[in-house]
Image (spheres, rainbow, N blue to C red):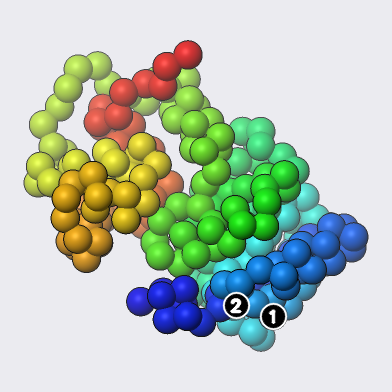
Amino acid sequence: MTDEARGTPARVVVADDQTVVREGIVMLLGLLPGVEVVGAAGDGEEAVRLVAELAPDVVLMDLRMPRCDGVEATRRIRSEHPGTQVVVLTTYADDESLFPALTAGARGYLTKDAGGDEIVRAVHSVLSGDAGLSPGIQRRLLEHLAESGLRPPGPQEPPDGLTTRETEVLVLIAEGLNNQQIASRMHVSTATVKTHINNLFAKTGLKDRAQAVRYAYRKGLVPPPRG
């Protein structure tokens, strides 16, 4: 059960090297239900230290910071403190920023034009096992995979021993649906969806939804984006 379901605010650390931006994010989140800011860091080193001290649920991570940038800080946090998730909150949406952050273990990626409600949704999404990716970021991820030529030609049978239902769940994940939306689409409970996700992750060795998108594309389960 997530913190949101229990009615307990998600405990968040904000990491940004610009004081005005950092304090603004802290102030904004302080006005919104569902989150509690427990610490603020001015660089990646401080973010890693605060995670070790405070064990927050989520870090909102800027990318370009002194001493230790957001990608390295994310990698260290996910390696040393796997109970803490990372949502990138940055000015940059270019490939050179996006893909290293996701590879390092970030479960969410937002740009700083995101509203407070969108940030809170992303925080609770990653705590529920969903990806906290904005629609534009998800679209860019799929476009990148298409440009990389990772999709093999022609349809395939379900890979790696996946059942038809597990494959269907995987495709819906790749389309950007969360667990509740998948349950509605498949006319099953969210508990059933979570069981399918756990099974398909175990069979494929996937660790998160960002990897699932890439896997589904590589296996030819997701069509190339249009336009």
Residue 85 on image: x %, y %: 53, 66
Task: Name the residue nearer the viewer: 169 or 45.
Answer: 169
Name of the residue lying farthest toward the bottom: 53
* Residue 199 seen in render: no
Task: Name the residue nearer the viewer: 144 or 227.
Answer: 227
Residue 71 on image: x %, y %: 65, 53
Q: Residue at x 64, y 84 (%)?
A: 54
Looking at the image, residue 205 sits to the left or right of residue 129; the answer is left
Q: Residue at x 31, y 23 (%)?
A: 223
Compute the Cα span from label 1 to label 2: 6 Å
Task: Name the residue nearer the viewer: 88 or 128.
Answer: 128
Does 221 appear above or below 154? below
Task: Name the residue nearer the viewer: 220 or 91.
Answer: 91
Q: Residue at x 84, y 66 (%)?
A: 23
Name of the residue lying farthest toward the right: 20
What amino acid type is highlighted by mark number 2?
Arg
Mark 2 highlights which residue?
11
What amino acid type is highlighted by mark number 1?
Val
Looking at the image, residue 77 sits to the left or right of residue 219; the answer is right
- Dividing the picture into quarters, in which one does residue 13 lie? bottom right
Secondary structure at badge 2 equals strand
Residue 67 on image: x %, y %: 82, 61
Mark 1 highlights which residue?
38
Secondary structure at badge 1 equals strand
Does 108 appear above or below 149? below
Residue 133 on image: x %, y %: 52, 46
- Dividing the picture into quarters, in which one does residue 222 lie? top left
Q: Are marks 1 and 2 in contact (CB under 8 Å)?
A: yes
